[in-house]
Image: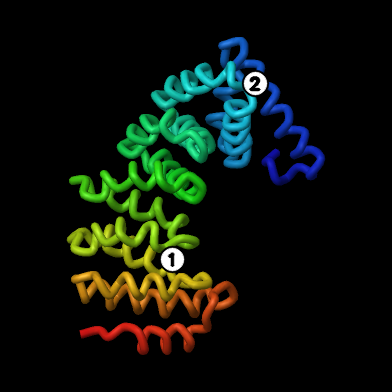
Amino acid sequence: MAFYDLTKTERDHVVKMIHENIYSEIVSGKFSELLYYLSDADTYIRKAAYIAIGRIYFLNKNLRKAVIALLNHFLLHENYNVRQTVINAAGEIGKYDFAIVQSIFERGLFDVHHAPRNAVIGSVKKMGEVNSEEVLNWAKKYLRHEDKEIRREICHGIELRGRKFPGDVLPLLQELEFDKTARVRNTLVHVIGQIAYKKGCLQIVIDHLKGWHNKQLVGDAIEEIIDVHHRYRNFSAMTQAEAIQYIQQHYQLS
């Protein structure tokens, strides 16, 4: 039975059991249930596992070395679900202690399977939201990487920080304004749109775009911003008409 086929009471019991079992196995150093949780086909079982690992790390200082050791061990596992869950667990830790898990992300960026690489993106998003300085400084060095997928993943990963603090990520995004790879360029345009619709964000984004030199890309980004204000009209600080008016008043495309 899938996790969300259970009642809330049953789900709470499963989550508690997963936490207790993982804790016991970390203490003993003998892993059996843990591998089952890390590789489970049900996304929510894996999520319960990586959240449990993160909590165990922060609640038990004496177990922190053991937790990091098990993450590094299972990061090499042949099952991509296991590697994905390990990276997500590292993301929970990296919200507040990025240095200790940095090497996990450096390896995960180059995983042969897309699922662990997507976990890197998701983890960079959640870590960057609360631990921006460390995470963004790390991300910046990959924006000129020769592998286009690395550049794209990093661009996508810093998006969430930008939704609240666009000024933090716009200088990093500008590093990609002349990227010739379509997938990277499309992701860049998407991210610019995503960081422009919350309260106070459009003004910061438009002001920063004035200093960009790739006017074709800026034009595409502005079209995306306008479209986002329609697609996300129930969440946008401005209506689409207000966004268009602001852009027309404050930015002139040459």
Which percent across, then down, holds residue 165? 45, 60
- Give the structural element (helix, strand or loop) at label 1: loop
Name the quarter where the N terminus is drawn.
Answer: top right
Closer to the camera in the image, 218 or 169: 169
Q: Residues within 10 Å of mark 2 (few under 14, many from 20)?
A: many
Which badge, 1 or 2, comes first in the chain's sequence?
Answer: 2
Q: Residue at x 62, y 16 (%)?
A: 25
Residue 155's mark? none
Which percent across, then down, holds residue 190? 37, 65
Q: Relative to residue 240, is residue 216 depicted above or below?
A: above
Q: Residue at x 37, y 58 (%)?
A: 169
Disc 1/disc 2 C-alpha distance (Å): 39 Å
Which residue is under mark 1?
195
Is residue 81 at all visible to an observer of this figure? Answer: no
Residue 23's mark? 2
Which percent across, then down, holds residue 29? 56, 11
The image's colouring method is rainbow
Amino acid type, mark 2: Tyr
Q: Residues within 10 Å of mark 1 (few under 14, many from 20)?
A: many
